[in-house]
């Protein structure tokens, strides 16, 4: 992960943490550093959140969150597990009796706070999970881009090797031609020496014939030398042109690679900014919905409390009427 991606991920985590102050306060009591707490505090943390989980639920939770029995659980791992299993771990104590007063008890307030903290924790877990999924997708895109760049680089390497083999083949052919010409020249010199020896030995040829033969061989030798020089110059020019073409090709490829890298960096920066804006907008929308749900729940509780107070008052009146009826019955029975 690049530095920009790490910074954006850390920024998203800080935003989420600031939106769950109640859960962060509970978690801080058991945090051993780096957002990690010991497995022995799992039950206590759930109780602080308002959940009295049975032992079998705690055993299953430890198997899911700490399969290697390291004795440590990460904060993000706990939130993901809690979001998936919240309905299965709730084993809250029985509710208060019907004759309770209309004033909310300290335990009810604690449950209400735990419920609010649970909602915040679920929002925090959802945001972090989405952040992890987006990071995984970004990493997959970068891996695909790197694989494509590697394939193109391998193709360019093969092209450069092919050109090098062609140049090496041209050099080898030129060396073979030079060797053949050198051998032909040496053979010609041997022939001249043999002819001279033959002429000296036979002494049957005239000086003019010998001079013509020598002149012919000399002219042929000069022609071969000139052809060799011309061909060598041609090959050198060909090699120089090939090298210039290779340098130009390499320069173009290098510039193309730099342009692609700059374009990719700009695209990643734009995508990251758009993603951060969208993430912040979604987080705010989710938080607004959660606040609206909380307000609806509070209004429902107020209605139920009013109804409870009304029923209690009605029951008291009924009990007074019942007591008066019993007193009247006792009075009548005493008169009889």
Image (spheres, grey):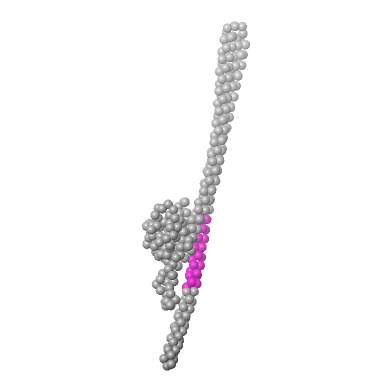
> Which one is in front, 327 or 110?
327
Q: Residue furthest bottom?
A: 335
Q: Quadrant of the C terminus?
A: bottom left
Q: Residue furthest front?
A: 336
Q: Is residue 190 left or right of residue 16?
A: right
Where residue 76 sits in the image (x, y, percent)? 44, 58
> Which one is in front, 115 or 12?
115
Residue at (54% x, 41% y) in the render: 154
Q: Is residue 151 left or right of residue 113?
A: right
Residue 288 magenta-highlighted: yes
Residue at (46% x, 82% y) in the render: 315
Residue at (57% x, 30% y) in the render: 170
Where residue 271 sits in the image (x, y, percent)? 52, 55
The quadrant holding residue 15 is bottom left
Q: Is residue 71 left or right of residue 177?
A: left
Residue 15 visible in rendering: no
Residue 90 magenta-highlighted: no
Q: In this picture, is 311 found above or below 244?
A: below
Q: Magenta stretch mostly in which secondary structure?
A: helix
Where residue 326 sits in the image (x, y, percent)? 44, 87
> Which one is in front, 110 or 69?
69
Magenta-colored span? 269-298
Q: In this picture, is 18 found above or below 137?
A: below
The quadrant holding residue 330 is bottom left
Total marks placed: 0
Residue 66 visible in rendering: yes
Where residue 333 sits in the image (x, y, percent)? 43, 90
Residue at (48% x, 70% y) in the render: 294
> Which one is in front, 176 or 215?
176
């Amino acid at each position: 992960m690049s530095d920009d991606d790490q910074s954006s991920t850390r920024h998203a985590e800080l935003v989420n943490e600031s939106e769950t102050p109640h859960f962060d306060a509970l978690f801080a009591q058991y945090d051993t550093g780096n957002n990690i707490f010991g497995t022995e505090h799992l039950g206590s943390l759930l109780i602080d959140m308002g959940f009295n989980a049975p032992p079998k639920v705690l055993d299953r939770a430890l198997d899911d969150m700490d399969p290697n029995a390291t004795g440590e659980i990460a904060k993000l791992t706990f939130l993901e597990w809690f979001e998936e299993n919240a309905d299965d771990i709730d084993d809250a104590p029985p509710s208060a009796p019907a004759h309770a007063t209309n004033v909310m008890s300290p335990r009810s307030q604690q449950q209400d706070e735990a419920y609010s903290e649970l909602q915040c924790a679920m929002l925090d877990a959802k945001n972090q999970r989405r952040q992890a999924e987006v990071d995984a997708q970004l990493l997959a895109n970068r891996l695909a881009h790197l694989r494509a760049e590697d394939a193109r680089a391998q193709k360019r390497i093969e092209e450069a090797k092919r050109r090098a083999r062609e140049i090496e083949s041209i050099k080898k052919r030129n060396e073979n031609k030079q060797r053949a010409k050198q051998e032909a020249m040496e053979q010609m010199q041997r022939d001249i020496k043999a002819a001279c020896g033959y002429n000296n030995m036979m002494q049957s040829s005239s000086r003019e014939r010998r001079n013509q033969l020598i002149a012919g061989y000399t002219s042929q030798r000069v022609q071969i030398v000139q052809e060799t020089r011309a061909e060598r110059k041609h090959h050198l020019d060909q090699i120089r042109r090939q090298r210039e073409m290779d340098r130009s090709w390499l320069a173009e490829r290098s510039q193309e690679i730099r342009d692609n890298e700059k374009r990719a960096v700009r695209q990643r920066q734009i995508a990251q900014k758009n993603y951060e804006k969208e993430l912040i907008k979604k987080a705010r929308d989710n938080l607004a919905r959660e606040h609206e749900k909380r307000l609806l729940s509070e209004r429902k509780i107020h209605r139920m409390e009013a109804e409870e107070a009304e029923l209690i008052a009605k029951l008291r009146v009924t009990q007074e009427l019942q007591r008066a009826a019993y007193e009247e019955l006792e009075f009548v029975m005493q008169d009889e």
